[in-house]
Amino acid sequence: DAMVIQNPRYQVTQFGKPVTLSCSQTLNHNVMYWYQQKSSQAPKLLFHYYDKDFNNEADTPDNFQSRRPNTSFCFLDIRSPGLGDAAMYLCATSRDRAGAPNLETQYFGPGTRLLVL
Amino acid sequence: AQSVAQPEDQVNVAEGNPLTVKCTYSVSGNPYLFWYVQYPNRGLQFLLKYITGDNLVKGSYGFEAEFNKSQTSFHLKKPSALVSDSALYFCAVRDIERSGGGADGLTFGKGTHLIIQP
């Protein structure tokens, strides 16, 4: 089945130690998103890739970076995790078409729960 | 700026009764509206969406939602609730006319816990 996969499902890191979260998709979607969801809060968009173009949200801290080496994979890098970065990180994909943007559904992976010690 | 409000933190419904989860939105242009469901420690699952056309949208697992432009609402409904419907429900919006166009992230409401009692 086509799907969005996130690894690992649970990640423990130490304060200040760089960590990378992984997302892959078999949907062949051209857009990939990263959301942060803190406990009891709504998911909040960090950034997204439209094809190879990176789009950062204005209020996303510099501590958060992303890489998309190919269509299928996208990574979230946290350079120096703080205690406040503990959250569920959700990857999503969509197939946005030229001339009909913003119409396609976003499909989410199961998320990676990050714990910072 | 676009926003979504889900006025109820929690909705309790007896199994077999109809349920409604409320959502109102604010956008500068045309709204594209979505409902997602989240089970504990899981990602979001798509339920349904409104883009254009019929104001009553039918989705997965027997859920439906009604778009009301005058009231800027998009309430989620189901005629007969199941215990397995117990989960966290998110309403979300995208605004096609947000500056820059192209693909855009979703703006979510804070979520509503739906509890179906046997």
Image (spheres, coloured by chain):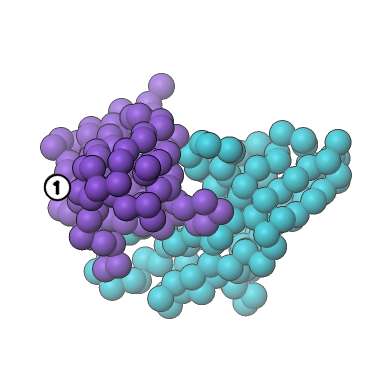
Q: Is residue A99 above or below residue B4?
A: above
Picture quadrant of residue A60? bottom left
Q: How many numbered marks does the figure carry?
A: 1
Given residues A100 and A17, the one toward you in this image is A17
Residue A32 in percent (x, y) is at 28, 45
Given residues A117 and B69, the one toward you in this image is A117
Left or right of B51: which side holds B55? right
User: Which residue is found at the position 65% from the left and 42% from the top?
Assistant: B87
**Residue beneath label 1, please?**
A52
Residue B30 in percent (x, y) is at 45, 70
User: Which residue is found at the position 37% from the left and 66% from the top?
Assistant: B96
Say which element carries label 1: loop
Q: Color of chain A here?
A: purple
Q: Color of chain B here?
A: cyan
Residue at the farthest top position: A1
Q: Which corner quadrant holds the C terminus of chain B?
A: top right
Taking the image as drawn, is residue A95 in sight?
no
Residue type highlighted by circle 1? Lys
Q: Is residue B58 above or below residue B6?
A: above
Mark 1 residue crowding within 10 angstroms, few (<14) / some (14–19) / many (20+): some
Picture quadrant of residue A71? top left
Given residues A112 and B17, the one toward you in this image is A112
Q: Which corner quadrant holds the N terminus of chain B?
A: bottom left
